[in-house]
Image: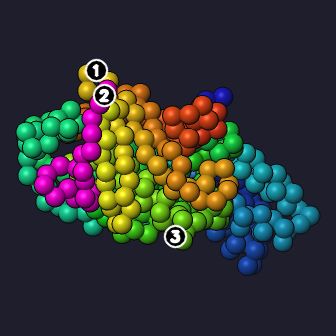
């Protein structure tokens, strides 16, 4: 059954479950608890109907409270247990596909975006930066930040769908925040590298931690990723006599490949940008700190394949990508590739 239809079935079922709680309310304190649960279920149903992102966090709390209330009312509340089980199954079914995953608002991402400089830079002059002529239209204001909407799939064993937003501020960092549907269950969180400090935090239903990481290795890996994504999606950070991404040196071009050395926050990295005959970016690769095989952290070839470009507000950038470890080897296709994304929209500041 179509997951959009299942969302409406979930709305109806939550309404019915609310009516059951109302009918089973009894007297005294129990009546007040069941009345509160009925109201909460109806509010969550309304949130699902209007596709509010907050229902992801509210639904498990309300269902857990309902289970506890039913446990205190045994044996007469077996129907309540059954209703809660069906509610969980319907919720998982309703968010199986990318278009049905609500994007949960991430506070860190919002605050980071609000900290971006509001005044754009000067117009782009291709005569000063010939390597960027394909990516930036002449006269386009040089942006210091971008906000990106995307969807795609991520490999965590099987491939799972996700929706996400990302903010990149040149010279400061990035925050990537998303929601993935893992076997139908929403996992929300973020990866970030801000002012040289990296962190990862992912939670089931946005509440229960399932993957967290920080420390020097995480920071070093996230910093390399941040600079790489700046090269891909914020080419204005490479422009001008004092590029905002850091110290940039164009070190060579041959056979359609441009190489540049970027020193950002003390990490020096050589990026290889491959272009086709029309100037379109075909691939970007660089050594990135990590341990994709679970061993010791070290620099491993990382990169992305560009399948399509699009133009947003004067910037022509990769819009459909596949990314992963062991780039340029047979292992990339076998067990290195883990991320596929399509850009839905971009803003620039």
- Horizontal side of residue 326 vs 128, given as left or right: right
**Label 1: which secondary element:** loop
Quickly name the residue at label 3.
216
Q: Is residue 320 visible?
A: no
Task: Bin the neighbour count of mark 2 within 10 Å (Cα to Cα): few under 14, some 14-19, many 20 and up.
Answer: some
- The residue depicted at 34 percent of the width and 37 percent of the height is 273
Instruction: Name the residue furthest top.
Output: 277
Quickly name the residue at label 1.
277
**Label 2: which secondary element:** loop
Is the N terminus in the top left, top right, bottom left or bottom right quadrant?
top right
Up/down of 194 relative to 251, above or below: below
Task: Bin the neighbour count of mark 3 within 10 Å (Cα to Cα): few under 14, some 14-19, many 20 and up.
Answer: few
- Asked if marks 1 and 2 touch (Cβ < 8 Å), the reply is yes
Magenta stretch?
238-255
Up/down of 209 relative to 274, above or below: below
Residue 250 belongs to magenta span: yes
Residue 149 belongs to magenta span: no
- The residue depicted at 73 percent of the width and 45 percent of the height is 89
Task: Bin the neighbour count of mark 1 within 10 Å (Cα to Cα): few under 14, some 14-19, many 20 and up.
Answer: few
Give whichever of discs 2 and 3 has the lower sequence position.
3
Where residue 309 sits in the image (x, y, percent)?
32, 30
Where residue 341 sits in the image (x, y, percent)?
46, 38
Point out which mark residue 9 bears: none
Q: Is residue 289 visible?
A: yes
Please tell me which residue lies in front, 6 or 287. Answer: 287
- The residue depicted at 41 percent of the width and 50 percent of the height is 165
Where residue 312 sits in the image (x, y, percent)?
24, 37
């Amino acid at each position: 059954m179509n997951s959009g239809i299942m969302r409406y079935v979930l709305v109806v079922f939550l309404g019915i479950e609310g009516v059951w709680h109302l009918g089973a309310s009894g007297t005294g304190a129990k009546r007040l608890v069941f009345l509160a649960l009925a109201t909460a279920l109806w509010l969550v149903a309304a949130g699902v109907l209007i596709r509010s992102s907050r229902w992801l966090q509210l639904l498990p709390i309300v269902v857990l409270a309902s289970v506890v209330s039913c446990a205190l009312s045994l044996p007469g509340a077996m129907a309540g247990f059954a209703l809660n089980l069906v509610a969980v199954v319907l919720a998982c079914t309703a968010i199986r596909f990318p278009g049905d995953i609500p994007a949960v608002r991430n506070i860190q991402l919002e605050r980071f975006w609000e900290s971006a400089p509001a005044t754009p830079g000067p117009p782009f002059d291709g005569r000063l930066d010939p390597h960027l002529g394909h990516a930036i239209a002449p006269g386009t204001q040089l942006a210091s930040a971008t906000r990106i909407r995307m969807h795609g799939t991520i490999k965590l064993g099987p491939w799972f769908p996700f929706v996400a937003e990302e903010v990149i501020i040149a010279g400061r960092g990035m925050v990537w925040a998303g929601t993935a549907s893992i076997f139908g269950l929403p996992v929300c969180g973020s990866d970030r590298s801000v002012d040289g400090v990296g962190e990862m935090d992912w939670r089931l239903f946005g509440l229960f931690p399932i993957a967290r990481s920080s420390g020097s290795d995480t920071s070093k890996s996230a910093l390399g990723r941040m600079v790489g994504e700046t090269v891909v999606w914020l080419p204005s950070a490479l422009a001008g006599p004092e590029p905002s991404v850091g110290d940039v040196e164009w070190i060579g071009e041959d056979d359609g490949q441009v190489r540049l050395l970027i020193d950002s926050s003390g990490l020096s990295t050589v990026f290889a940008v491959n272009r086709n005959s029309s100037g379109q970016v075909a691939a970007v690769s660089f050594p990135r700190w990590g341990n994709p095989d679970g061993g010791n952290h070290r620099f491993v070839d990382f990169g992305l394949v560009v399948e399509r470009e699009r133009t947003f507000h004067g910037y022509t950038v990769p819009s459909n990508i596949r990314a992963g470890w062991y780039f340029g080897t047979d292992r990339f296709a076998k067990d290195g590739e883990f991320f596929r994304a399509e850009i839905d929209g971009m803003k620039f500041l």
